[in-house]
């Protein structure tokens, strides 16, 4: 039941605050915490945590591994989060930087968000060249799609990442796709260390790409931008320069987003 605030400014609902604290803790520790862990960390009784997690699981906001009994964010919460992140503000903030990158390197730049089913393109800045790579806003691309997939997957904690890799076989889009799990994990570790990802014909034959994350105030990717070009022209020094420019643009966008 809602309780009246002491200053008379309105009402609050303690259980809702506790539910949000549970979701925040799960988000920061994907697939690592069970009921006892959450109870201990948040100083909330096990019975209350049990009730909250059961309700959130029923709503699809959380998922519980049947074997380990640990929780991770569910599709409902991921969907709501991405709807918020993919709104006008993110696109409006990123658009000028995307256009600048597109004009400078004469390649197409995409902005996308991520959920456990894949990546959604929410904005694009087409190359000014006559022959270019393009895809409309709203296009869905696979979870493991090249550089953008690496950027998002590299942000996941190890248990959650290994669970995805166990459940989903690495696809062979081209002969250059990474299909060995251990090699892919090493590639993601490299992405974490350097702050960007590359894709040299791993997703589409004849196409290279680089991608950088856009971090929110919690340090998690609110989205990612990626620059895409044909492998015969988007290569070598041009790729290196585009990486540097994209990182600078992402830093500026992330600063505006509050990270």
Image: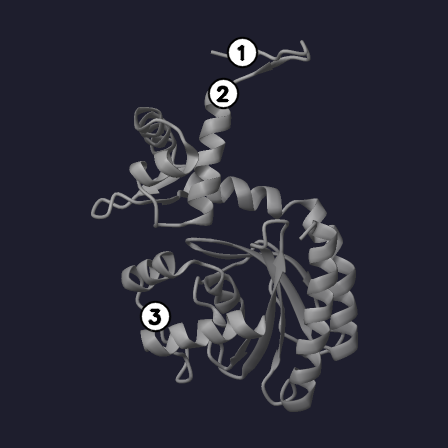
Q: CB under 8 Å between callouts 2 and 1?
A: yes
Rendering quarter of residue 225: bottom right
Q: Residue, x 33% and y 64% (percent of image)?
A: 165
Between 64 and 114, the one lying in front of the other is 64
The percent coordinates of residue 124 (x first, y second) are 67, 62
Q: Which mark is residue 3?
A: 1
Kindly state the secondary structure of the residue where label 2 is placed.
Answer: helix
Separation of disc 3 and disc 1 at Cα?
50 Å
Residue 179 found in image quarter: bottom left
Identify whether 243 is placed above or below 116: below
Is 107 rendered above or below residue 57?
below
Image coordinates of residue 154 in percent, x first then y, are: 47, 65
Q: Which mark is residue 170?
A: 3
**CB contact under 8 Å: marks 3 and 1:** no
Q: Is residue 106 left or right of residue 143?
A: right
Q: Circles 2 and 3: CB distance less than 8 Å?
A: no
- Numbered badge on residue 14: 2
Q: State the residue in front, 259 or 139.
A: 259
Mark nearer the N terminus (2 vs 3): 2
Residue 258 visible somewhere in the drawing: yes
């Amino acid at each position: 039941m809602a309780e009246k605030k002491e200053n008379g400014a309105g009402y609050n609902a303690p259980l809702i605050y506790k539910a949000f604290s549970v979701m925040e803790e799960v988000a920061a520790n994907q697939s690592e915490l069970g009921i006892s862990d959450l109870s201990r960390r948040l100083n909330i009784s096990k019975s209350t945590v049990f009730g909250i997690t059961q309700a959130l699981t029923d709503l699809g906001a959380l998922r519980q591994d049947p074997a380990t009994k640990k929780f991770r964010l569910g599709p409902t919460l991921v969907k709501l989060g991405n709807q918020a992140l993919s709104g006008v503000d993110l696109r409006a903030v990123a658009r000028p930087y995307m256009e600048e990158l597109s004009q400078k390197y004469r390649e197409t730049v995409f902005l996308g968000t991520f959920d456990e089913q894949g990546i959604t393109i929410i904005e694009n800045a087409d190359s000014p060249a006559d022959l270019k790579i393009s895809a409309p806003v709203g296009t869905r691309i696979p979870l493991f799609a090249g550089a953008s997939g690496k950027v998002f997957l590299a942000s996941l904690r190890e248990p959650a990442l290994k669970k995805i890799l166990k459940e989903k076989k690495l696809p062979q889009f081209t002969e250059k796709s990474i299909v060995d799990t251990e090699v892919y994990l090493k590639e993601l570790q490299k992405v974490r260390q350097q702050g960007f990802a590359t894709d040299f014909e791993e997703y589409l034959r004849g196409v290279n790409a680089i991608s950088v994350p856009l971090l929110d105030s919690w340090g998690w990717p609110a989205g990612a931008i990626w620059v895409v070009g044909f492998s015969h022209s988007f290569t070598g020094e041009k790729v290196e320069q585009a990486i540097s420019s994209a990182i600078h643009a992402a830093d500026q966008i992330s600063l505006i987003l509050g990270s």
